[in-house]
Image: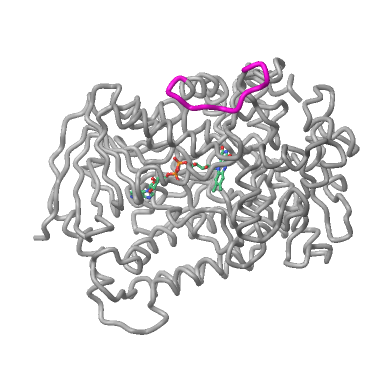
């Protein structure tokens, strides 16, 4: 028998980003014991990287904003594939969650007369993003962390969960390893909340950190939970493209919100060339009107740079493919031009976008107050994830909840910027509350040794295998997967490429089964990478299977062989589940009908 430490919590939260912290705070308010586990140090979660802001219809800058407009914007952005109940709850509850965060000490930027400042962002009709310069995620994590540590939550840092434990249908705990010392931990729990974030590391070019290997998606799937909307991967239009070492790092949409424009190598502002019909009435048809919008003119319409991310990313790809790109394979994003309009523009840019100014100066030797940036699409966010009940966030596996980026439903086919941070707060809170209630209503179930022993044995195999071939190296397998997903299941997709990717994934699974790692168990990143492979391969397969099945183009999913929307598929959701034989299955299910009162709101806001 392997030695391991056992911890018992009524509610175990896996992941300490915005969603996990908010869930843990709420669960502990429900008078239950709470354990919080995270792969890195507390406070280093991906949420800390969020830049632009939190979307909430606070109406502090434009009193015409309200939850109904936010709801309609979110549904339109998601091309009506959203879980309408989640979109409704999110729009209704986000303002209260932001004010609550402020009450806990978050210091948001203010208007001159002291109201919370809100900025423009793509797809949002009114200025709606509460922000702290371009470091909003940092303030959010700092506040939640400060608040959370006073609630009696037990935190396990640098601890990676490798499997969920079940008794019958119910989830009853998890097995994890301690990254620093290489020992194993067992968590016994009455309810588990997954809040593990996204999947960006399945791709070569990504804004995501090393932690985003789709663990929660995969843990849930292997425990019998359904995944939905996995074909919808968001490629943010603006990541850095040069120098190669920083390729993919995010350039916030806030740059465009502050008046930044996109140009091709000929200096042409190409976003005016193609405006989707659904957004034509809301989009400026000249540069002057677009500029006035960014400066708060309530009668002006948004510039085309602030159309939804899927559309902007595809326009950029078109410019690059047709030979009008920048020298390093992107296009130009220019905020420096605003000096023609604003006195003191350089200081204004530094104040509004301090992290962007610093990032380009340090990493690319570019002063964005004087020169344009080179940008191109980068894998950013996954709309797909664990299928949950909109009100409680529980999955189809009793006792297993999910919130934040690893859950699905709110964003449909495409997420609007800023809607993730508010998602974390609204649904993190709901997940924590309902997990605590579930824990109180359900008995402790004893853990069995066999699955724990099995999980530990499987985790140790890469270290114990004899090997030596380069092809079995964990980094090599991860690299080959990332190259393949980028190439074959990226922004523009076609059947033959995706079928080849599925074959490729099968081959990579074979190689992963024989992966070997040198060294010992103490802080061994090679070993950690080997254990991440199972998750990366699971999510890569789920994305590819769902994308093959959706034979149309919608939101973030663009098929070169089916470039139009398909009416029948507009009513379908792709559901991924594990079959009885262990193979992955994809199935179409009907999207639930939007109730008449919400449909009316959508119609009124068109
Ligand atoms: C650069 C950047 C800028 C962004 N800007 C914005 C923005 O301005 N506005 C907005 O709305 N959205 C933004 N986003 C998106 C948003 O930040 C994320 O979607 C969101 O932070 C995800 O939060 P989360 O709580 O779901 O996950 P995370 O914050 O990523 O937290 C995941 C947690 O899970 C832990 N974890 C993962 N796997 C395991 C495991 N196996 N075992 C134990 N722990 C595990 C990690 O250690 C981490 O603690 C941005 C994203 C990026 C990359």
Left or right: where 302 falls relative to 463? right
Which residue shows up at 56% across the image and 27% down it?
Answer: 108
The image shows residue 407 at horizontal and vertical percentages of 46, 40
Task: Pick whichever, 229 or 215, lies toward us.
Answer: 215
* Figure quadrant of the N terminus: bottom left
Task: Pick whichever, 46 or 482, lies toward us.
Answer: 46
Colour pattern? one colour
Count of numbered labels shown in the rendering: 0
Task: Pick whichever, 258 or 367, lies toward us.
Answer: 367
* Figure quadrant of the C terminus: top right
Left or right: where 268 falls relative to 243? right
**Residue 104 in which image quadrant:** top left
**Residue 406 in which image quadrant:** top left
Left or right: where 323 falls relative to 504? right
The question of residue 394 being in magenta is answered with: no
The image shows residue 38 at horizontal and vertical percentages of 33, 46
Instruction: Look at the image and tell me whether residue 596 can be seen.
Output: no
Instruction: Look at the image and tell me whether residue 542 can be seen.
Output: yes
Residue 271 lies, with reference to residue 431, above or below; the image says: below
The image shows residue 140 at horizontal and vertical percentages of 48, 34
Magenta stretch, residue numbers = 103-114
Magenta span: predominant SS is loop
Which residue shows up at 49% across the image and 39% down it?
Answer: 138
């Amino acid at each position: 028998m392997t030695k391991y430490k056992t911890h018992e919590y009524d509610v175990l939260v896996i992941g300490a980003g915005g969603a996990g912290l908010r869930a843990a705070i709420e669960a502990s308010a429900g008078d239950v014991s709470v354990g919080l586990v995270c792969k890195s140090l507390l406070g280093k979660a991906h949420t800390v990287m969020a830049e632009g802001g939190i979307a909430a219809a606070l109406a502090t800058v434009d009193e015409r904003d309200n939850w109904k407009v936010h709801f309609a914007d979110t549904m339109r952005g998601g091309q009506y594939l959203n879980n309408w109940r989640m979109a409704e709850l999110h729009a209704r509850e986000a303002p209260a969650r932001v004010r609550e965060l402020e009450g806990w000490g978050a210091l948001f930027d203010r208007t001159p007369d002291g109201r919370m400042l809100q900025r423009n962002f793509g797809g949002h009709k009114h200025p709606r993003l509460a922000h702290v310069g371009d470091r909003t995620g940092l303030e959010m994590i700092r506040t939640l962390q400060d608040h959370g540590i006073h609630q009696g939550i037990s935190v396990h840092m640098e601890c990676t969960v490798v499997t969920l434990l079940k008794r019958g249908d119910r989830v009853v705990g998890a097995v994890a390893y301690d990254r620093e010392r290489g020992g194993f931990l067992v968590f016994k729990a009455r309810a588990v909340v997954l809040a593990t974030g996204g999947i960006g590391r399945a791709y070569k070019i990504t804004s995501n950190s090393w932690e985003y290997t789709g663990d929660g998606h995969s843990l849930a799937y292997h425990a019998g939970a359904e995944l939905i909307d996995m074909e919808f991967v968001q490629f943010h239009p603006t990541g850095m493209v040069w120098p190669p070492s920083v390729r993919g790092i995010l350039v916030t949409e806030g740059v465009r919100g502050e008046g930044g424009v996109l140009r091709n190598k000929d200096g042409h502002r190409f976003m005016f060339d193609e405006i989707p019909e659904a957004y034509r009435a809301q989009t400026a048809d000249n540069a002057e009107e677009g500029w006035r919008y960014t400066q708060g003119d309530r009668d002006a319409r948004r510039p085309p740079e602030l159309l939804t991310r899927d559309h902007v990313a595809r326009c950029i790809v078109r410019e690059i493919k047709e030979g009008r790109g920048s020298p390093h394979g992107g296009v130009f994003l220019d905020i420096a031009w605003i000096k023609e309009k604003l006195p003191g523009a350089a200081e204004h840019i530094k104040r509004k976008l301090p992290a962007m100014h610093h990032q380009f100066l340090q990493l690319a030797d570019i002063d964005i107050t004087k020169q344009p940036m080179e940008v191109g699409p980068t894998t950013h966010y996954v709309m797909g994830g664990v299928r949950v009940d909109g009100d409680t966030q529980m999955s189809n596996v009793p006792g297993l909840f999910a919130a934040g980026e690893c859950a699905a439903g709110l964003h449909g086919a495409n997420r609007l910027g800023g809607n993730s941070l508010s998602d974390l707060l609204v649904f993190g809170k709901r997940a924590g509350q309902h997990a605590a209630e579930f824990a109180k209503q359900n008995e402790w179930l004893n853990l069995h040794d066999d699955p724990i022993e099995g999980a530990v044995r499987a985790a140790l195999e890469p270290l114990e295998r004899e090997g030596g071939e380069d092809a079995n190296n964990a980094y090599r397998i991860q690299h080959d997967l990332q190259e393949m997903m980028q190439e074959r299941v990226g922004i523009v997709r076609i059947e033959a490429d995706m079928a080849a990717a599925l074959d490729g994934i099968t081959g990579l699974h074979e190689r992963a089964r024989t992966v070997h790692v040198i060294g010992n168990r103490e802080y061994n990143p090679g070993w950690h990478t080997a254990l991440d492979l199972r998750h990366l391969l699971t999510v890569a397969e789920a994305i590819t299977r769902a994308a093959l099945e959706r034979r149309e183009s919608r939101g973030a999913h663009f098929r070169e062989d089916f470039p139009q929307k398909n009416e029948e598929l507009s009513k379908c959701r792709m559901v991924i589940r594990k079959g009885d034989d262990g193979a992955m299955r994809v199935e179409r299910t009907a999207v639930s009908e939007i109730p008449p009162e919400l449909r009316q709101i959508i119609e009124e806001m068109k």
